[in-house]
Amino acid sequence: MDHCFQASTKLNAAYKSDTADLTTTERVELWGRPHEDIRFNMEVDTVTFQTDAIPLSPAKLLLNGEKVDFDPFSGEAYGPVVLGGSTVIEVEAEFPWGVMKSGPLTVKEPNMSITFEFTDDMESVLATTIGDYYRSYLESFETEGDLPLKHVTGEFNRKVVESLKTKGTEGYTTQLWVKNKEIQLGDSYLTQYDGKYFTNVNVRMDYFESNFLTEEGPGDPGFHNQTLQYNLVYDNGWKVNDVQYSSMDYEEDFNETRSVMRDSGVYQLVIPARETTLETNSTPVLPAMDPAQFIINFRNMYENALNAVDFSIAEDYLLYDSDAYHELKDYIETEVDDSFEFNFTLNDPLSVETSEDGAKVRMHEKFIFTHNGDRTDYNREKVYHLTIDSEESYKITRIDILETLRD
């Protein structure tokens, strides 16, 4: 006699291993059938791990708070583990400067990207490194790069010293002092390239700068604030590898910060006036265009470039790879937004000095900057440094802001 089952029942299945402890239930209706195939579904998979910074020695993997015997960066898959949110992993690893951990990560996919977080002590070291470097920069600034820089790579040292050697203007004094400089916390990201570890640190700075004719004495200092990104490399300690302007918002993107330096005091660079004499029989070949008119033409193009957010409009007036080229290119491409409006209201040449290889033009400039209905009036004096290129045309190499007034 055949047995007929007329019942509803629950069937349980369990799976247990070093990486998973699973149970699941299926309800089955057995109406008049002597047998039934039951399928149990469990959401598990093996997991692989990637990172942008491989540690010195095998890393430690923690599964739901418990250490397991597995190196997550061995290239092998780990598992099976439960997907869907019930499994939390952390990774702990040793680096040349100490131990770093990833934040807790919920396993939802079979491929996990691991990012190591800087501890409070590590961020303190980065702040100290940047602070020591910038103090040495200010000291070297006073000597046009003759004093050594601290915590820098060889290539960056060369770049900074070259910039300091050409920073001053003959007959002028430049004063610089930092009111506040601080780093952003919680956003340092570790990467690895060519066997070395790198990280980027976001920095904001308030400072005063004044440029004035030495014989006339100090004028009103201009107040500035800017955001920067420091790239550091670990080479027997963290070293500054590069510094670039950043497009980060000065207020909104710096919620939690750590001080790098406050009230540096005044650092001063004095460049004596030098008399330039031409040989008796020399006849310098100067471009046909008057240097002052060249700057006026540039200002018109620069206004268009700002309002169009298009550096190429004014690019031809700048010597390629010069300080002025990089400063204006970086400013337009990282700082200027298409909601900004620039209105240049005055471009008045004050003086022109020509030489065999170029010219210097002192300008009085006024412009109106408008953003979201807020208007700021700027009143500035600048010195434009011009060189003569191979086609016997003027090109701007450097722009010194002597004084800035804002209303």
Image: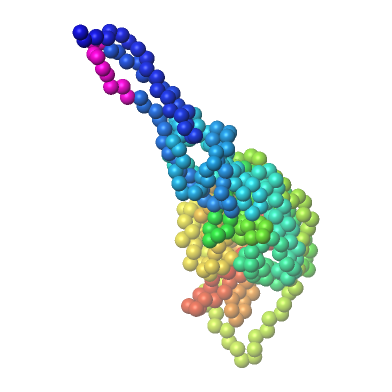
- Nearer the observer, 401 or 300: 401
Residue 56 seen in render = yes
Per the image, is 38 magenta?
A: yes
Where in the figure is residue 280, as x and y percent of width and height?
Answer: 64, 91
- Examine the residues drawn in magenta and state their main secondary structure: loop
Residue 256 at what x, y percent from top left?
Answer: 66, 40
Q: In this view, does 203 lie above or below 381?
A: above
Q: Does the magenta stretch include residue 68?
A: no
Compared with residue 373, is residue 98 higher up or lower down, i.e. above or below? below
**Residue nearest the observer in this picture, 96 or 181:** 96
Quarter of the image for residue 149 reads bottom right
Question: Looking at the image, which is closer to me, 386 or 34?
Answer: 34
Image quarter (top left, top right, bottom left or bottom right) of the N terminus: top left
Q: How many marks?
A: 0
User: Which residue is found at the position 61% from the left and 70% from the top?
Assistant: 385
Residue stretch in magenta: 31-39
Name the residue at 57% across, 84% down.
Answer: 284
Q: Quadrant of residue 214?
A: bottom right
Q: Decide if residue 144 is on the left or right side of residue 397.
A: right
Q: Residue at x 40, y 19 (%)?
A: 12
